Image (cartoon, rainbow, N blue to C red):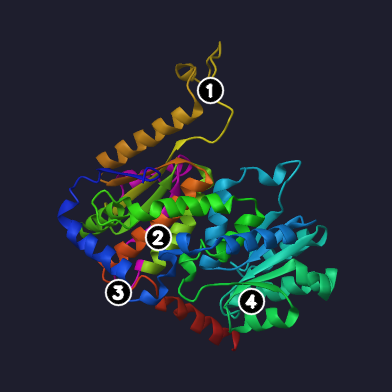
């Protein structure tokens, strides 16, 4: 697969001795013989999704968008991070300031319980035409359930129950759960969260695809990128980029590198890092094991965390997510200035992207020399095809990596601990 290139020259070791362990983990994943195998639907999802399913997603997205300025997507964890990541990666950086918008602005709620956040959201919705997509398998997860109760009330009072049927869509379980019952009672359109796909692996289901389609993302192209990457990511070969990544990070973990920084040099990738953090954090962090996933946005964070990365405790590894070519049609170059007060004339004629790439290379060289092993993952462009391939690549690598750690990649028992305390304190 040419879409994803993994460079391991910065890790300072040969991963081939561990190949048999990684290949065995990949076989376990593909054959469904490991723990959590009931949740492997995502593995074939790019091929399994049908044209009619894609058409319905696009149709509902189009209908929901008619005359609507803001669509509130309600969900938490995997029920919002994948959509947020892709929309941020593929949208204009200053979307809200554009004079003309082809699609509604997609905003998110239910990922926190801040009263200020919800109050400010309601104030914005008050003067604009709005709609809502609510995502929850059970319908009882506290944060999204609380947000939906408030936002549903706002929409029904503003537009009436009949029009609310057009403006509210639920993505939930096929047959059971509070949200499914409510959607049936109210007459809301629904999409199904597949039983065999867990939340953090659901980005290529309607959970991610419907909000993306509303925001104008070419979901067919996104899926085609994931589909094209499937054969290579599932191949039992040392050339498999997903296997390479899993082998490298586990080899470094065995050497005491217990924190992985996913670093990017493109601000549109911030939320892709957030999605990655949940994917790996919930999948691997169990039974006293796992690599702690953290993220940094470079060069911004080099001016805050750079010192610690360079000379702090040596338990860090770094994975740099790089974009080969910029998307902009406007080639921005540094022009010569007669006074050269800022001392930048030595960059005259060079593209801004070239300067950024040299910052990336220089940072990698410094960190490797400072004792921070470095993996580099490159995609050709920040477009729908490349992002689709990247999502699938990270998912497969996560499954392999977790099985190499001998943990179940698809459960999250520790998540319940805070909920028990919260419910007790709230008097449930």
Rendered view: 44 above or below 94: below
Residue on which the image places disc 2: 395
Q: Say left or right for 104 vs 263.
A: right
Residue on which the image places disc 1: 333
Residue occupying image coordinates x 70% and y 66% = 132
For disc 4, the neighbor class at 10 Å (few under 14, some 14 to 19, many from 20) is many
Q: What is the CA distance from the residue labelled 4 to the residue labelled 2? A: 27 Å
Tell me whether circle 1 and circle 4 mark residues in contact (CB < 8 Å).
no
Which label's residue is closer to the chain start, 1 or 4? 4
Q: Is residue 142 visible?
A: yes
State the SS at label 3. Answer: loop
Q: What is the CA distance from the residue labelled 2 to the residue labelled 1? A: 37 Å
Snapshot quadrant of residue 178: bottom right
Rendered view: 249 above or below 266: below
Residue on which the image places disc 4: 145
For disc 3, the neighbor class at 10 Å (few under 14, some 14 to 19, many from 20) is some
Which mark, by number, is residue 360? none
Which label's residue is closer to the chain start, 2 or 1? 1
Q: Position of residue 38 (x, y in %)?
A: 39, 77
Q: Nearer the viewer, residue 407 or 147?
A: 407
Q: Say left or right for 181 vs 236.
A: right
Snapshot quadrant of residue 331: top right
Q: What is the CA distance from the residue labelled 3 to the residue labelled 2? A: 16 Å
Residue on which the image places disc 3: 34
| Residue that extends furthest to the top in the rendered view of this protein | 338
Residue occupying image coordinates x 46% and y 65% = 201
Rendered view: 19 above or below 338: below
Which label's residue is closer to the chain start, 3 or 1? 3
């Amino acid at each position: 697969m040419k879409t994803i290139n993994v460079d391991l020259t910065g890790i300072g070791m040969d991963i081939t001795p561990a190949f048999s362990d990684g290949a065995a983990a990949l076989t376990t994943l593909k054959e469904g013989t490991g723990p959590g195998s009931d949740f492997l639907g995502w593995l074939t999802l790019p091929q399994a999704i049908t044209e009619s399913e894609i058409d319905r997603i696009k149709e509902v997205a189009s209908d929901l968008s008619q005359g609507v300025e803001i669509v509130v997507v309600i969900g938490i964890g995997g029920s919002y991070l994948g959509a947020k990541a892709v929309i941020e990666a593929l949208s204009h950086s200053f979307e809200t300031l554009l004079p003309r918008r082809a699609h509604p602005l997609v905003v998110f709620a239910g990922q926190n319980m801040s009263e200020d956040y919800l109050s400010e959201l309601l104030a914005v919705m008050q003067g604009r035409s709005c709609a809502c997509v609510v995502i929850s398998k059970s319908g009882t997860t506290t944060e999204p359930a609380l947000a939906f109760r408030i936002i549903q009330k706002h929409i029904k009072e503003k537009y009436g129950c009949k029009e609310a049927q057009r403006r509210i869509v639920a993505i939930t379980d096929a047959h059971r759960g509070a949200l499914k019952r409510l959607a049936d009672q109210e007459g809301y359109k629904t999409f199904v969260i597949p039983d065999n796909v867990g939340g953090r692996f659901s980005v290529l289901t309607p959970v991610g695809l419907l909000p993306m389609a509303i925001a104008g993302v070419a979901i067919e192209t996104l899926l085609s990128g994931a589909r094209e990457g499937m054969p290579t990511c599932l191949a039992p070969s040392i050339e498999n980029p997903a296997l390479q990544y899993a082998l490298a990070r586990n080899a470094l973990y065995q050497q005491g590198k217990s924190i992985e920084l996913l670093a990017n040099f493109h601000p549109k990738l911030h939320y892709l890092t957030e999605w990655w953090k949940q994917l790996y954090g919930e999948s691997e962090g169990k039974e006293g094991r796992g690599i702690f996933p953290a993220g940094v946005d470079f060069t911004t964070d080099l001016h805050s965390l750079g010192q610690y990365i360079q000379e702090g405790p040596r338990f860090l590894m770094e994975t740099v997510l790089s974009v080969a070519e910029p998307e902009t049609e406007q080639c921005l170059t540094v022009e010569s200035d007669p006074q050269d007060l800022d001392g930048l004339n030595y960059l005259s004629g060079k593209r801004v992207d070239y300067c950024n790439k040299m910052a990336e290379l220089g940072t990698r060289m410094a960190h490797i020399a400072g004792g921070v092993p470095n993996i580099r993952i490159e995609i050709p462009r920040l477009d729908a095809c490349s992002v689709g391939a990247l999502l699938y690549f990270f998912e497969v690598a996560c499954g392999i990596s977790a099985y190499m750690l001998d943990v179940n990649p698809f459960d999250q028992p520790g998540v319940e601990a805070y909920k028990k305390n919260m419910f007790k304190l709230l008097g449930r």
